[in-house]
Image (spheres, rainbow, N blue to C red):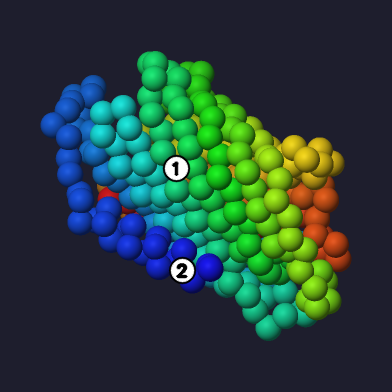
């Protein structure tokens, strides 16, 4: 199932590149592109269920047409745990947004994750909700989102001899803050709270902070820290994973 989804994602990215277009709009005397992308090549140091120095790749693609926005995110990390030879960690996210007011919007997304070193073969989620931009200026942007949806998971027991399947209603609340520090540097903070509505003790926190510095219009350097906490981790696995990334970013 994961391989089938990866093939669809590759096709989707190729279609994005084939459909490149630029809207003839000016905003603050600057041309606004309909399509943009960012791809990062990272050196990672991890702690938690994996403790290795390894490599990663993540990519983000955005297509904006009038009040509509489509966003795709994907990442791959090759990591080793203490007892495993190695395992690939996948994450992909496809999201659609529709602006309804100057600052409010509706959204829907689908997400799939795979992280065997942390105890799950896959986690799927389909959600819909709304978001609001509290403030947006050249130097500061703050927004929040809340969604409701369905999640399906296939987790592993520590001995790998059995699998745990579950399906449940879920909710996700997130906030994102961007601060323009200087003409070529930006600080970004993204906080996500996920809760299993069928079992409120099963909640998860994800925190991502990054500092990026533009070297040119197309190249940037970025250092980021990601923390993932599971209040009810898969039995036999640790509750907290951390990733420290140093990245070379290509922007188009």
Secondary structure of the residue carrying tag 2 is: helix
Q: Residue 67 at what x, y percent from top left?
A: 31, 27
Q: Where 224 sits versus 9, above or below? A: above
Earlier residue among tags 2 and 1: 2
Indicate the quadrant where residue 118 lies: bottom right
Number of other residues with Cα within 10 Å of mark 2, as a class: few under 14, some 14 to 19, many 20 or more? few
Q: Where 68 sits versus 18, above or below? A: above
In the displayed structure, does residue 197 sit left or right of residue 248? right
Camera-side residue of 200 and 183: 200
Indicate the quadrant where residue 185 lies: top left
Q: Residue 128 at what x, y percent from top left?
A: 53, 35
In this rendering, which labeled residue sits more in front, label 2 or label 1?
2
Residue at position x 73%, y 55% in the image? 166
Whether residues under marks 2 and 1 lie with C-beta atoms below 8 angstroms apart, the answer is: no
Q: Where 25 sits versus 69, above or below? A: above
The answer to whether residue 43 of the structure is visible from this angle is: no
Camera-side residue of 43 and 121: 121
In the displayed structure, does residue 18 sit left or right of residue 73? left
User: Could you say which disc has been placed on residue 4 in the image?
Assistant: 2
Camera-side residue of 141 and 214: 141
User: Could you say which disc has been placed on residue 95 in the image?
Assistant: 1
Residue at position x 86%, y 66% in the image? 236
């Amino acid at each position: 199932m994961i391989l089938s989804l990866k093939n669809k994602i590759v096709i989707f990215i190729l279609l994005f590149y084939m459909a490149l277009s630029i809207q003839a709009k000016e905003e603050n005397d600057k041309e606004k592109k309909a399509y943009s992308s960012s791809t990062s090549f990272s050196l990672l140091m991890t702690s938690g269920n994996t403790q290795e120095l390894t490599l990663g790749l993540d990519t983000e693609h955005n297509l904006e047409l009038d009040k509509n926005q489509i966003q795709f995110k994907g990442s791959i990390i090759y990591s080793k745990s203490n007892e495993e030879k190695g395992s690939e960690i996948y994450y992909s996210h496809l999201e659609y947004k529709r602006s309804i007011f100057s600052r409010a919007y509706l959204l829907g997304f689908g997400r799939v994750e795979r992280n065997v070193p942390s105890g799950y073969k896959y986690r799927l989620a389909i959600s819909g909700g709304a978001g609001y931009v509290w403030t947006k200026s050249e130097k500061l942007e703050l927004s929040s989102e809340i969604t409701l949806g369905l999640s399906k998971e296939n987790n592993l027991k520590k001995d790998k001899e059995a699998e745990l399947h579950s399906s449940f209603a879920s909710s996700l609340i997130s906030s994102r803050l961007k601060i323009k520090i200087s003409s070529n540097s930006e600080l970004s903070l993204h906080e996500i709270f996920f809760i299993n509505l069928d079992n409120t003790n099963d909640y998860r926190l994800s925190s991502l902070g990054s500092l990026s510095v533009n070297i040119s219009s197309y190249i940037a350097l970025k250092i980021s820290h990601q923390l993932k906490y599971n209040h009810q981790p898969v039995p036999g696995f640790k509750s907290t994973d951390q990733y420290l990334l140093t990245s070379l970013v290509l922007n188009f």
